[in-house]
Image (cartoon, rainbow, N blue to C red):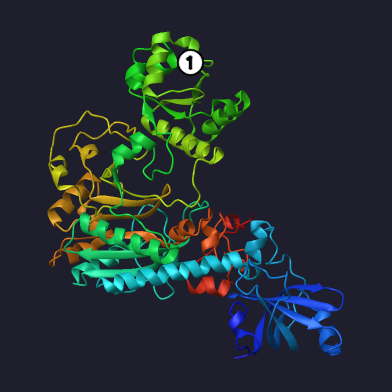
Amino acid sequence: MLRTKTCGELRKSDLGFSVTLTGWVDSVRDHSGVLFINLRDRYGLTQIVFLQGVNDEMFNTVRSLHPEDVVQVTGTVQLRPEGIVNKKIPTGEIEVNAEKITVLNRTEIVPFQPAAPELPAEETRLRYRYLDLRRPAMQKTLMLRHRISKVLRDYFDEHGFIEIETPMLGKSTPEGARDYLVPSRVAQGQFYALPQSPQLYKQILMIAGYDRYFQIARCFRDEDLRADRQPEFTQVDLEMSFVDSEDIIEMISGLMERLMKEVLGRELKLPIPRISYDEAMERFGHDAPDLRFGMELIDLTDLAKEFEFRVFRNVADSGGRVRAINAKGVAAKYSRKDIDGLNNWVIEQFGAKGIAWLKADAQGTLTGPIAKNFTDSQLQQIAERLHVEADDFLLFSADTFGTTCKVLNGLRRRLAAELKLIEPNEMNFCWVVQFPMFDWDAEEQRWIATHHPFTAPLESDLPYLTNTKPETTEPTTTEPAAKPEILTPEKIRAQAYDLVLNGFEVGGGTIRIHDSRIQSKVFDLLGLSMETAKEQFGFLLNALQFGAPPHGGIALGLDRLVMLFGGLDNIRDCIAFPKTTKAADLMTGAPSPVAVKQLDELAIQIKPDNVKTVTE
């Protein structure tokens, strides 16, 4: 090796030893005849000292160095002089008195310094990702990712799981998002699909008798992106046979307990709390609720039906909902201009009609532009329902159930961030269970699977899958158009479970259907003919006929876990080479045109009018 020690390794116990270090020049400082360089590698940073007059050639070489030059230094470990110990770094008590330096490579002028405290624009960071990856913060995150992967592999190994890889080139199946398609050269005009998840393969593995499988799997979805979503992402994928949902929840809860202890050095108290989907939507307006703060949604629909205030009453009488949140003790912090900004935000973000608001004065009396529409008794009813105290700030949404969920969940999270109600180091887990099995697609006028068509219903809800009478009760969490007069699918709950951390879904799974009769009924409900089902899922349907065991599983988002364990707010900072929100790799230039010869081999012709260049 060109080095005997790393730049983060030396301590007082190494005093007097001759060492050779290699790395990147982090900084060069000239202190009146004494030159200092901070030498950096991924392990840390060491201060190197060069004295004038000892070796003029070496001294001049050091003076010519620039940050990010690559050098090799040999010298003796010594204590730093009293008063200049750096307690912020592990090597801060020592320095290396240089005897020799070799420049291994000189750098061009870099567009930004990895050691600089100010970050450049993200576009610049992604374009020069090799420089960005030198930043200690990025290195810390990728080491955290490695550590999480190591711990979970050890955990699953201890619990009898086998790591099995599944294909990258598979069959295109309808799974919610667009597939990334790969044209076949040998079967021209036909395509593989990159996996959105290993879902079907892992079910095959259960049928094949591998009763505990896991994989750190690369997955691909061609969908619109955001800060916590990428076109290619990594799942911690697992499946188990002869289990129910309790077994899956217990296994993953144990994994979270292990990760918290071994990665963050913190205790996670088990069992992780559970909340039903319906309760989550009622209390928080979202199926991945952030439980680190209050401001829960309160329903006022029953009161609104008795009010004369038409904005509320008309919505309540037409089957909508009137709901509110109470931001405790912050009324004085929100001016009329601020409130107008919140109103415009919910209109733009969620397509809502707007919000109404009231404030409580020092005596707890409700005031505001809509207060005149209520009697004193009605204002008192509102105050009691919302537990109003002095200086409280009330925000109302009157609309369909779905819209009130979006509006008040959005406001709840925004206000919590603005008011700094969230302890940044808190890690708040919960399980959300008993999801609806089906959603009504008003555009296509049909029921669709909330998760996937192989999700098993709760046994208690199986009768709803065979009832032939139409159901008039509206679904709790959707606004369907006219529903087909068959079955009662809105009442069917799935054996589904999501793991939520700090308001983010970090994992989701289901128990699968292993009974072909139930599977057939589900296909019928989805309007999926057996011919179509065989065309899309034939290999799995065939396998289910040959002794399929009861089985279920879950997929955890590794990228999102790393983001949350690392206290970050952008998933791109957890991936070595991420894509932009337009699915572009700015460093390599992908996606990019290919040679005509390659297209000819694939029997693909590009229409010139359809060529689009990704721009940021």
Give percent across and percent down for residue 332: 58, 25
| Residue highlighted by disc 1 | 365
Residue furthest front as drawn: 82
Give percent across and percent down for residue 172: 36, 61
Q: 112 or 208, which lies in front? A: 112
**For residue 597, which quarter of the picture?**
bottom right
Give percent across and percent down for residue 375: 42, 8
**For residue 300, which quarter of the picture?**
top left
Give percent across and percent down for residue 227: 53, 52
Q: Residues within 10 Å of mark 1 (few under 14, many from 20)?
A: some
Left or right: where 400 falls relative to 139: left
Residue furthest top as drawn: 375
Residue at left offset 81%, top offset 87%: 58
Left or right: where 368 falls relative to 187: right
**Callout 1, which amino acid?**
Thr
Residue 314 seen in the current view: no
Q: Is residue 314 above or below residue 62?
A: above
Q: 462 or 357, which lies in front? A: 357
Residue 388 seen in the current view: yes
Quadrant of the frame with the N terminus: bottom right
Q: 554 or 611, which lies in front? A: 554
